[in-house]
């Protein structure tokens, strides 16, 4: 019996010493958590989108232009061939209206997060303003009207515009997902009724010039419900542009051209400017528009 008690006591002592020794052994450390960095937004990448807004003339004048011409100019048909005639252009419509279209471009941001951004953008716009600006209010000649085949120009008319577009550089600064930028570059456009009034017709005169402006753009998260095309971001922008298109018509400043090709200038001694301004004018206007872009590339 005593031997059994001694054996039990010895076993308990060994077990106690073993557990204490095991407690002193180094434990296996748990693996550290995996660090997943949060992506820093960058404006670098290609983008494409669409826009809509309003354009309005910056040098409009509603005052009519009235021009008188002698019969010897060959503009008016008259039995006697001596009676003078008068043309009046109403100039009644401002060079303004709806604009809308699309754009594509590329941005490069030097430092992700906040930093300078440079880019280039091209856009094409439909424009609907100024179509009827140079219509005749009246045309009179004793005993007759305008000789068929004669083109009569408004010497101080503003052009209509059917479309325009730009190719511009952009320079801005990004505050994370907000981009403030300035922009400027080449502009082009064409439209009906450019710088003259025709009784029954119009003309398409292609013009070139420049555009300058600026805007603010904000990038929504990638998982925005507006991200239909699975792009890296959807951006909204508000932009203002000033567009100036040089007059691209070789007959600018002329009063009329008859069927034989003879050009009658407003400075001709047979032409009298009763009211209005005998000067050519550029097609210049401002555009305010909002747009949405789909950005493709890095986050």
Image: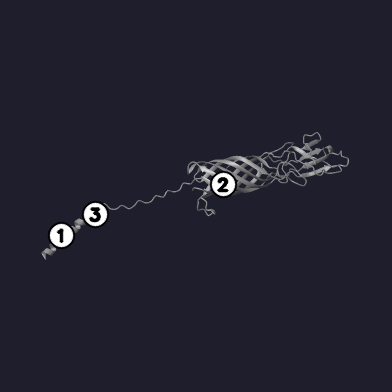
Drawn side of residue 112 relative to residue 27, left or right: right
Query: Residue at 62% across / 43% down in the picture?
Result: 166
Q: Which residue is mark 1?
A: 10
Query: Residue at 54% across / 46% down in the picture?
Result: 46
Say few, some or many: other residues with alpha carbon within 10 Å of mark 3 (under 14 / 14 to 19 / 20 or more). Answer: few
Q: Which residue is mark 3?
A: 23
Give the mark, 3 or 1, whose residue is nearer the N terminus. Answer: 1
Q: Secondary structure at mark 1?
A: helix
Q: Residue furthest front?
A: 260
Q: Quadrant of residue 280?
A: top right
Check residue 269 in the rendering and tell me which mark sits there, or answer none.
Answer: none
Count of marks placed on residues? 3
Q: Nearer the viewer, mark 2 or mark 1?
A: 1
Give the mark, 3 or 2, whose residue is nearer the N terminus. Answer: 3
Give the mark, 2 or 1, whose residue is nearer the N terminus. Answer: 1
The picture places residue 167, in percent across and down from the top left corner, at: 60, 42
Drawn side of residue 221 relative to residue 213, left or right: left
Q: Residue furthest right?
A: 80
Q: Nearer the viewer, residue 251 or 217?
A: 251
Q: CA distance from mark 3 to mark 2?
A: 66 Å
Can you say whether 228 is above or below 63 in the image?
below
Q: Which residue is mark 2?
A: 237
Q: Quadrant of residue 135?
A: top right
Say few, some or many: other residues with alpha carbon within 10 Å of mark 2 (under 14 / 14 to 19 / 20 or more). Answer: some
Q: Nearer the viewer, residue 214 or 191?
A: 191
Q: Nearer the viewer, residue 228 or 141?
A: 228
Q: Nearer the viewer, residue 190 or 128?
A: 190
């Amino acid at each position: 019996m005593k031997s059994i008690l001694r054996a039990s006591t010895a076993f308990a002592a060994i077990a106690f010493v073993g557990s204490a020794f095991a407690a002193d052994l180094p434990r296996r450390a748990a693996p550290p958590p995996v660090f997943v960095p949060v992506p820093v937004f960058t404006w670098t990448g290609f983008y494409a989108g669409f826009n809509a807004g309003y354009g309005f003339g910056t040098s409009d004048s509603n005052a009519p232009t009235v021009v008188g011409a002698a019969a010897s100019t060959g503009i008016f048909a008259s039995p006697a061939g001596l009676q003078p005639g008068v043309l009046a252009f109403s100039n009644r419509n401002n060079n303004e209206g709806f604009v809308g279209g699309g754009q594509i471009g590329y941005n490069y941001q030097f430092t992700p997060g906040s930093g300078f951004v440079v880019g280039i953008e091209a856009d094409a716009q439909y424009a609907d303003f100024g179509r009827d600006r140079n219509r005749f209010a009246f045309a009179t000649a004793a005993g007759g009207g305008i000789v068929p085949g004669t083109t009569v120009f408004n010497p101080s008319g503003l052009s209509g515009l059917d479309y325009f577009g730009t190719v511009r550089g952009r320079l801005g600064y990004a505050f994370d997902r907000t981009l403030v930028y300035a922009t400027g570059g080449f502009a082009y456009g064409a439209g009906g009724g450019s710088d003259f009034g025709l009784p029954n017709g119009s003309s398409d005169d292609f013009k070139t010039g420049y555009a300058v402006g600026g805007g603010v753009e904000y990038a929504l998260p990638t998982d925005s419900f507006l991200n239909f095309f699975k792009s890296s971001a959807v951006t909204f922008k508000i932009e203002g542009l000033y567009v100036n298109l040089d007059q691209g018509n070789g007959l600018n400043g002329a009063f009329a051209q008859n069927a034989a090709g003879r050009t009658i200038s407003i400075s001709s001694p047979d032409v009298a400017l009763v009211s209005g301004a005998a000067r050519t004018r550029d097609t210049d206007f401002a555009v305010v528009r909002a747009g949405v872009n789909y950005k493709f590339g890095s986050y």
